[in-house]
Structures are given as structure tokens and as C-alpha cells.
Image (cartoon, rainbow, N blue to C red):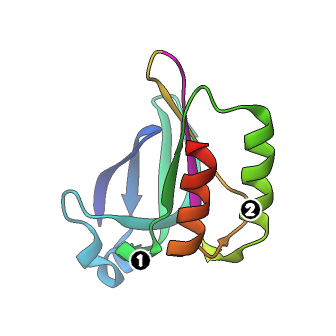
Amino acid sequence: MAFVKIEDESGIIEAVVFPKIFSRSRNCWAKDQLVLVKGRLESRDEGQTLLVEEARILEEKELSAEVKIPSQMSPRKLVELNKILKQSPGKDKLTLVFTDNQGRAKKMVLPFGVNFNPELKERIEKLIEE
């Protein structure tokens, strides 16, 4: 059994890994390991705890690609970007990173997959630079 802290861009959550799950996922629980976790939240007076039901190491190829969207990008270009992305369906996850004038970033994971290949990346970069 293990008590762990899981951290991502949104914050930190305490998690409980019961013995049966821990024995199947022992290699996941190292510091700075990228882990894909499935579980359920339990609310208590101290806050929320994640009860881990499944865990596995997240492979580098499964990570989503990121596209940085500058603050001055016009609505017309955003509509065009959406059109380009929807014309390239696939299984890759893509995160759009919007930056404001103060340099703060907000991330949005697309609700659909894309085929993020060099050609698509080039089309996106060309649109952003126009």
C-alpha cells in the first residue's frame, strides 16, 4: 500500500494506492515519473483524495503535443486553425497554449484527436506567422 502525491499543471492531490493495485503498478511510483492514473475521488474534511484503481507509466509518445497561440492572433486565424485541425483527424492529443499580454498561459486540450505530423505542424506554424 502507498500514499502518494500526484502533481500536474492544475495542482497536487493526495492519492491512496491499495495493496493489490500497488503490487501491479509498483514501477509507477517513483519521483518525477509520468503516470497515467485512473481512480475515483473521495471527499473528506481535509480535502479530496484520489483512490487509485489503475496506474501505468505514461510513454513519451502518448504525451500531447503543444501549439503556442500568440495573444495577438485574430479570430479569423483561430477559425482557420480549427478548420485545419479538424481536417487532420487522428489519435494524437493536442494542447493549445494561449498566452495573454502579460505572458500568462492557459492550456486547452482539444476534445478530438489529430494526426500531428510534420506537415500539419508546418501548416499551423505558417498560419500563426502570417
The front one of 36 and 128 is 128
Q: Specify the quadrant that holds the C terminus.
A: top right
Q: Which residue does the image show at 35% across and 84% down from the upper left?
A: 24
Q: Is residue 51 left or right of residue 115?
A: left
The amino acid type of the residue labelled 1 equals Lys
Q: Give the Cα distance between marks 1 and 2.
A: 22 Å
Q: Which residue does the image show at 58% across and 54% down from the upper left?
A: 126
The residue at the far left in this view is 31
Q: Quadrant of residue 16?
A: bottom left
Would you say the magenta stretch is mainly helix, strand or loop? Answer: strand
Residue 53 horizontal/vertical position (percent): 51, 70
The crowding category of the residue bearing disc 2, from other C-alpha atoms within 10 Å (few below 14, some 14 to 19, many at least 20), is some
Q: Is residue 95 magenta?
A: yes
Residue 51 horizontal/vertical position (percent): 49, 58
The crowding category of the residue bearing disc 1, from other C-alpha atoms within 10 Å (few below 14, some 14 to 19, many at least 20), is few
The residue at the far front in this view is 130
Q: Is residue 118 magenta?
A: no
Q: Is residue 15 left or right of residue 129?
A: left
Task: Give the residues in magenta.
Answer: 94-101
The front one of 3 and 5 is 5
Residue 21 visible in image: yes
Q: Quadrant of residue 74?
A: top right
Residue 54 horizontal/vertical position (percent): 48, 74
Q: Secondary structure at mark 1?
A: helix
Q: Which residue does the image show at 44% across and 67% down from the upper left?
A: 63
Identify the residue position indicated by label 2 in the image: 84
The residue at the far bottom in this view is 24
Mark identifier at residue 61: 1
The front one of 50 and 121 is 121
Q: Secondary structure at mark 2?
A: helix
Mark identifier at residue 115: none
